[in-house]
Image: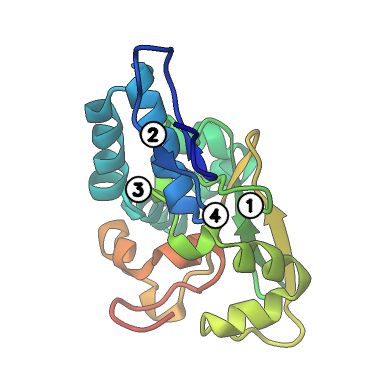
C-alpha cells in the first residue's frame, strides 16, 4: 500500500517499522524522529527519559542562580567568571551537554544583554536546564533581534531609554549566561539567600533580578 503524504516508514522489506506523522508541528517532528531512532535501535528510550528528567528536575535554572549568587558575593570569582566563564562555571561542577563553551555577559546600567538562538535552540543546559518553550519559538528568535526593547517590554522588562540593549546569538560553539545586576535591596544577603533573587529569565536577559515572589 502506498504511503500517505506526510508519513515515513523505516526498515527493510519484511521488517516493517512504525509510521510517524511528520507534520509542521515541531513537537510532532521531534516525536517522529525519536520514534524512528528507537525503532532502528539507535536510541534507548530510558536513556532519553533519564537525560530529560535530569535537566528538568535536578538542574533547572538553580545551578545558574548559584553561579550568579557567588559572583555577587565574591569579587574574585566574578572577575574569573567574566574572563573565563567556561572554567569558572566548571569549577562549581556545572558542565556537560551544551555547557562546554560558556561566555558570561555582565549587565550594567549602561548595557543590558539578552540571549537568543536564531537558528534553533542552543541553550546552556548545564546551568539553566531545558530551554523554555518561548525561547525556541520563531517569534522570539526573529523579533528579539529586530526590536529587542519591545520584546523585553512584553516580558514586563522596561529599561531606561539610555540603556543600550545587546543581543547575543547562541551557537553550537558558544552558549551565553547573563549576569544580571544585583538589586540594591539584596545587598548584604549571603549567597544561599541570593539564589532566590535570580529567576531563569534574568539569566537569559528577558528579565531582571528581583526579590522572591516579585515579578521581574
Q: Is residue 67 visible?
A: no
Q: Is residue 181 visible?
A: yes
- Mark 1 vs mark 4, foreground winner is 4
Q: Residue at x 45, y 79 (%)?
A: 184
In this view, the residue in front, 104 or 146, is 146
Q: Which element carries disc 1, helix, strand or loop?
A: loop
Q: Which residue is mark 2?
A: 34
- Mark 3 vs mark 2, foreground winner is 2
Q: Mark 1 to mark 4: distance in Å?
A: 20 Å
Q: Quadrant of the C terminus?
A: bottom left
Q: Mark 3 to mark 4: distance in Å?
A: 34 Å
- Mark 1 vs mark 3, foreground winner is 1
* Local crowd size for mark 1, using a 10 Å CA cut-off: few (<14), some (14–19), many (≥20): many
Q: Position of residue 120 (x, y in %)?
A: 61, 48
Q: Is residue 44 left or right of residue 82?
A: left
Q: Is residue 185 left or right of residue 169?
A: left
In this view, the residue in front, 126 or 151, is 151
First in sequence, mark 3 or 4: give its number.
Answer: 4
Q: Which element carries disc 3, helix, strand or loop?
A: helix
Q: Mark 4 to mark 2: distance in Å?
A: 16 Å
Q: Quadrant of the N terminus?
A: top left
* Local crowd size for mark 4, using a 10 Å CA cut-off: few (<14), some (14–19), many (≥20): few
Q: Position of residue 12 (x, y in %)?
A: 43, 12
Q: Mark 3 to mark 2: distance in Å?
A: 28 Å
Q: Which residue is mark 1?
A: 117
- Mark 3 vs mark 4, foreground winner is 4
Q: Which residue is mark 3?
A: 63
Q: Which residue is mark 4?
A: 24
Location of residue 55 (image quadrant): top left
First in sequence, mark 1 or 3: give its number.
Answer: 3
Amino acid at each position: 500500500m502506498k504511503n500517505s503524504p506526510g508519513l515515513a516508514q523505516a526498515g527493510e522489506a519484511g521488517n516493517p517499522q512504525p509510521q510517524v506523522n511528520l507534520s509542521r508541528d515541531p513537537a510532532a517532528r521531534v516525536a517522529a524522529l525519536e520514534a524512528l531512532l528507537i525503532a532502528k535501535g539507535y536510541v534507548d528510550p530510558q536513556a532519553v527519559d533519564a537525560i530529560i528528567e535530569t535537566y528538568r528536575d535536578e538542574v533547572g535554572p538553580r545551578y545558574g542562580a548559584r553561579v550568579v549568587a557567588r559572583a555577587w558575593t565574591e569579587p574574585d570569582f566574578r572577575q574569573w567568571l567574566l574572563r573565563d566563564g567556561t572554567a569558572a562555571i566548571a569549577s562549581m561542577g556545572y558542565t556537560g551537554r551544551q555547557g562546554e563553551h560558556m561566555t558570561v555577559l555582565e549587565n550594567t546600567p549602561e548595557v543590558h544583554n539578552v540571549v537568543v538562538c536564531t537558528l534553533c535552540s542552543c541553550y546552556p543546559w548545564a546551568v539553566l536546564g531545558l530551554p523554555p518553550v518561548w525561547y525556541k519559538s520563531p517569534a522570539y528568535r526573529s523579533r528579539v533581534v529586530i526590536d529587542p526593547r519591545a520584546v523585553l517590554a512584553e516580558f514586563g522588562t522596561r529599561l531606561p531609554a539610555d540603556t543600550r540593549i545587546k543581543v547575543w546569538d547562541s551557537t553550537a560553539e558558544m552558549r551565553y549566561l547573563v549576569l544580571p545586576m544585583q538589586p540594591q535591596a539584596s545587598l548584604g544577603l549571603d549567597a544561599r539567600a541570593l539564589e532566590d533573587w535570580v529567576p531563569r529569565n534574568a539569566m537569559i536577559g528577558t528579565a531582571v533580578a528581583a526579590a522572591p515572589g516579585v515579578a521581574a
